Image: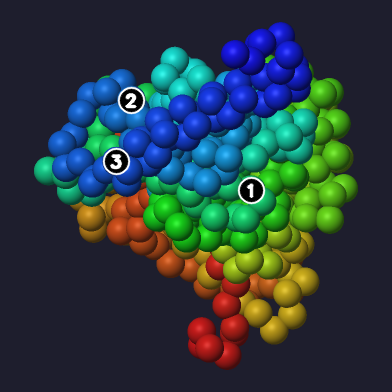
Amino acid sequence: MLNPSAIPVVVVRAWRRLRVLLSLLVAGAALAACASKPPPSTEARPFDRAVQQAVDDLMVQTQKMPAFLARVESRLQQSRIVIDPLLDGTTGQQTEVTQAAQQRVVQRMQERFAQFTVSQVDSQAVAQAQYLLSGTLTRQADASAGRWQLALALTELKSGTVVAQSTARVTDEKLDTRPTAFYRDSPVSIRDRAVDGYIRTSQTPAGQQADTLYLQRLPTTAVLQEAIDAYAAGRWQEALARYEAAAQRPDGQQLRVYNGLYLTQMQLGRTADAERSFGQLARLGLEASKLSVKFLFRPGSTEFLSDSRISGVYPMWLRQIARQAAQMNGNCLLVTGHTSRTGSESVNERLSLQRATIVRTRLAAEAPSLARRLKEAGMGFRENIVGTGADDASDALDRRVEFKVEDCAASS
């Protein structure tokens, strides 16, 4: 009989590793056999249960991933997932409820899926992560289908492929849709091409490519999120430093970056710098052919709010918009007023047109050479983004004034 002590230690260790590997591969194969994506549920669930369902459906799909099976030998080696903060799928904003959903997503993953480590997006986490988690919470137009839909997507960063995606319907009348500080204080709508790419990726079926531009800009997004977090905590100097770092990157010419520079410079009392940043913000919006500014008027009136803490900066905004628009030789500027969904349609269309006319007049006064290239329109609430009629911070975007660049010959 062979003396066990005579067996080389290296052989014993190799045999033990092989036994562990085989047992785990068998378990993994069993999971993979039944881990095809669950069919979408048509049942709307309360918020917490819907989040749990979405996370469980998402993560069970990872059990069949070759990368996961290749690493099952080590119980200690964990896949790293970085989570880009969830967004409202309609406005592109972070809100109180998207933050709550994100916290529950992380908690659920930590409780049920110990093979993954999850951290919020920042420069270090992005550099170390293998996977990216993104998600949206979107209000549904058809109430019978559930008031909200939560979508989550897991993207492999190396290949740019969405490897798992899940949805869950949410029914809850009390979700807090107020924007978080950065988005609440923003003077403009900052849903741009990168934000569109984030939303598109979160709703992309497994096996398809994530949005290329969104992934390319992820390192800058990480710096930007660090700045947003510092701004929310009232750390103005730190926020400004991170926004400045983002602006200096090759892809830093973004609405969110210059919006952050403007906000922090205003908080620090650097008004001249803030005006320059707003000018850049206006330029970027106009170059994209659409700039949506949150001018707030008194209810039912064409006069701006009398609170100087809000409307005191409006003359500067108008000055910079006029200057930037005046430089667009050969192009016209359509000024369109919008209202939230309160009151009759006819009253709101008339009021939105009157407000657009007031803004148009102010622009012409700032830049007389622009006067002949200005037009105005009123949409009432026909193009609401949020559409709740809450008339508070949650639907401020519905009361925007839009500036759209048009070819003068085409619009005449």
Q: Residue furthest left?
A: 144
Which structural element holds mark 3?
Answer: loop
Residue in view at x 33 percent, y 25 percent: 52
Report the number of numbered marks. Answer: 3
- Earlier sequence position, callout 2 versus callout 1: 2
Residue at image mark 1: 157
Image height of 178 relative to 381, above or below: above
Residue in view at x 42 percent, y 19 percent: 112
Which mark is nearer the camera, 1 or 3? Answer: 3
- Label 1 to label 3, Cα distance in Å? 25 Å
Q: Nearer the viewer, residue 295 or 118?
A: 118
Position in image of residue 376 (x %, y %): 48, 68
Image height of 411 relative to 311, above or below: below
Q: Are marks 2 and 1 in contact (CB under 8 Å)?
A: no
The 10 Å Cα crowd at callout 1, few under 14, some 14 to 19, many 20 or more, is some
- Earlier sequence position, callout 3 versus callout 2: 3
Which structural element holds mark 1?
Answer: loop
Residue at image mark 3: 34
Which mark is nearer the camera, 3 or 2? Answer: 3
The 10 Å Cα crowd at callout 2, few under 14, some 14 to 19, many 20 or more, is some
Residue at image mark 2: 52
**Amino acid identity at mark 2:** Gln
Position in image of residue 81 (x %, y %): 59, 33
Residue 294 seen from this side: no
Q: Examine the image and state in which quarter residue 340 appears.
A: top left
Which structural element holds mark 2?
Answer: helix
Q: Nearer the viewer, residue 232 or 130?
A: 130
Would you say 43 lies left or right of 188 here? left
- Earlier sequence position, callout 1 versus callout 3: 3
On-image quarter of the N terminus: top right
The 10 Å Cα crowd at callout 3, few under 14, some 14 to 19, many 20 or more, is few
